Amino acid sequence: MFVSNDPLTVKKIKEITGLEKNRIKNIINELISNYKGDNRPFKIYEIAGGYKLGTKPGYSIWIRKILENIKKHQISKAALETLAIIAYNQPITRLEIEKIRGVNCSGVLFNLLKHKFIRISGRKKVPGNPLIYKITDTFLIHFGLKKLSDLPKLTEIGII
Amino acid sequence: MNNIDVDIKIKINEFEASTNELIKKIKENIIDIDLVSITEIINQYLQYVIKNKNIIDLSNAGKTINNMVIILKIKSEYLLPKLEIKNNEREDNEYNDFATSKEKESYIQEYNKFQKVVKYLKKKEGDQNNIYFPMMKSRTKKDNIEIQKVDLADLLVCLEKVLLSKKKKEFIPIKKRIFTIDTKMKEILNLLKNSKEGFSFEYFMERVQSKLEIIVIFLALLELIYLKKINCFQNKSFDKIIFNMKGDALN
């Protein structure tokens, strides 16, 4: 978990260690509760269907001083809008996104594809066979989501 | 004149008539257009044409086609969604305005919903920015310098380019120089030893005086890559191919 660049799934841990899935889950849960205490600067995060070791938010002030040259990705508002529309309506075509946003989205989609936040999942069986887009694990990692269904329902969103 | 009316009879269910009569009956609503099969009419027509190809009058046969097109038009109009025609234009405009404003409103509502999602995602992003994961920094840093692998095809394209550019200039025969791949390899290694950043493919070709020399240098570079003494890379697509010394080759 410490060295893996992608979130480590239970399946992957099983492949490496040969342990039973339940046992792995128990050990991880044990570790999670162990790290919860104040005496540790890091904890295990459950994101994108796997586990990842990361620092606790409270330590970010000091960490930033060390990593001052490294800036995290800041997604633009247009890109966030596009991502939100894809996340809630995937698989979706460019035209369908543009219908909701009311502006051209080619550039935004190109950048999102470049940074691997979305992927092309095929073509829609309608005249013109347009490409359809889906979000990727990079999106889940970036926003710290376990899975896509973790996003609030559109009907609930007014409460947030 | 309309001999064809007598000649070609189209059978639809129990009704049998020429295409002219058929149109008439459809217009008078005696025959339901829904029951009229265009393919059936065409099949019957084609059968008739094939059967009587020697005696058929082409102008009359053409008229039947014309009638079939009319039936096809009536049928397609019937099948298409009907637009409500209102006599009062003002009322019509008002209706349209109402419809578009309602449509607009629903779009705005939908868009506003996503604005709230954007806020939620922004908050999540902010939270996530306070968490640091090991190994993540290399991902963010590497985004700017994307080093792509160079394969033989890229190198050949580059060689072709250099050869083409050299073709335009006249080669001036000076002294005959003998160069072997071995000597060129040594020359290249000597050059690269003193430069950390490395040199581009074009740099090696700058002072070249013959086609043969270009090829020898190219082969020398390939040999050095094969021997793993030098690296070659591109900073981005279509950029210059850069050669530099491998770390262990320096020793």
Image: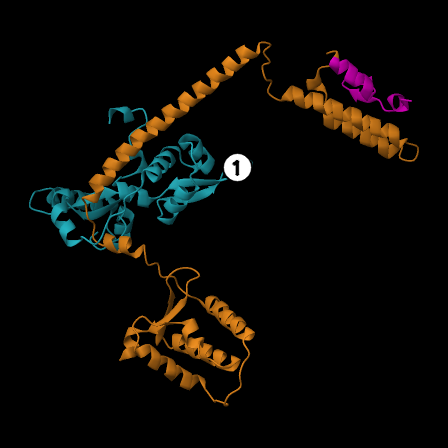
Chain colours: A cyan, B orange
Q: Image point 47% across, 35% down: which residue?
A: A95
Q: Image point 72% across, 25% down: which residue?
A: B72
- Whether residue B8 is in magenta: the answer is yes
Against B6, residue B247 (above or below) is below
Relative horizontal placement of residue B29, taking residue B19 as reference (left or right):
left
Q: Which chain letter goes with mark 1?
A: A
Relative horizontal placement of residue B65, taking residue B99 as reference (left or right):
right
Against A17, residue B75 (above or below) is above
Residue A135 position, x and y percent, is 36, 41
| Near-viewer residue (B227 or B143) | B143
Q: How many marks?
A: 1
Against A144, residue B86 (above or below) is above
Residue A157 position, x and y percent, is 28, 27
**Tag 1: amino acid:** Lys
Q: Which residue is mark 1?
A: A125
> Can I make out residue B114 in this image?
yes
* Chain part drawn in magenta: B1-27
